[in-house]
Image (tube, rainbow, N blue to C red):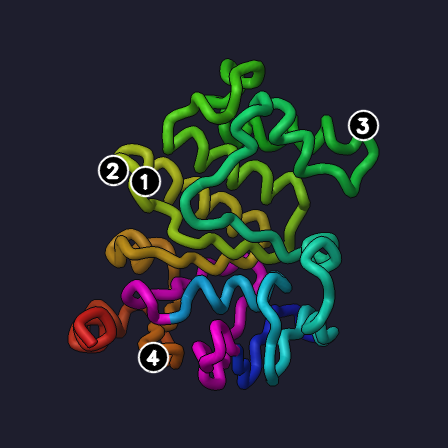
Amino acid sequence: MEERLVIGNLIVDQGGREVLHGINLELEPGLVTALLGANGAGKSSLVSAVAGNVAIRSGVVKLDGRDIHGLQPHAIRRMGVAVVNEGHPVLSNLSVRDNLRAAGMMFTAAETERHVTAVLEIFPELEAKLDLLAGNLSGGQKQMVNIAQALIAQPRYLLIDELSLGLAPAIVKRLGGVIKQIASGGVGVLLIEQFTSLALSIAPRAYVMERGRIVYAGPSEQLRVRPEILHGAYLG
């Protein structure tokens, strides 16, 4: 059985109206895939549906051939799909250490500590912040905590909603390198990103959404040589 996360003919309603109109998308292990489009295109709704946070009217979401549509979010996370939510939210009144430990609730205490140690090797910047309240971190540090929390769940697929939102260019560059590192370890990454040049530089494959529909699926290189595709999606 070929390993991949497959979204097929997905239709989702929110607020009494259809917001996703037959979405087809695939993620492969070890590959960064970009999902681009203007605000309101439906990108976050797609992530919420895959993660089990939004009901699906019809269509399928299959993880390595198994339909995960209808499962609870915690079950989907346990099966290997983790989400980095938009806006880098953290448990503000808990320490960074406890934020990381909370992400390992499905593991034993010893396993969680091993996973925390592993993510601190990816984000050594957090080592000195472990005893600080997470709410006192900078935006970039909070995003590192978010990504670290997702990695502690040992995902096979990682859905990142707006990696660079509100962050300084140096932090964005740093996180872009981390995303490539994560993928090189065999994790399939869906990168939702307003900063298109970043996304296209690290994602060999891309999808473009416009008004709840996929209007492009293919190599990222084509979006560089045919910028009118992106212009149309962003300018509507």
- Residue type for callout 4: Tyr
Q: Percent x, y for residue 42?
A: 40, 70
- Marks 4,1: beta carbons within 8 A: no
Q: Name, please, the residue furthest toward the front.
A: 16
Query: Please, is residue 21 above or below residue 112 in the view?
Result: below
- Marks 3,2: beta carbons within 8 A: no
- Residue indicated by mark 1: 172
N-terminal of the two: label 4 or label 1?
1
Q: Which residues lie in the magenta part?
A: 13-41
- Residue type for callout 1: Val
- Residue type for callout 2: Pro
Question: Dot 3, how many residues are within 10 Å of its Cα: few (below 14), some (14-19), or many (20+)?
Answer: few
Secondary structure category for the residue under label 4: strand
Disc 3 to disc 1, C-alpha distance: 32 Å
- Residue indicated by mark 3: 110
- Say the numbered circle drawn on residue 216: 4
Q: Nearer the viewer, residue 179 or 193?
A: 193
- Residue indicated by mark 2: 169
N-terminal of the two: label 4 or label 3?
3
Residue found 26% across the figure and 74% down from its top:
222
Q: Percent x, y for residue 15?
A: 48, 73
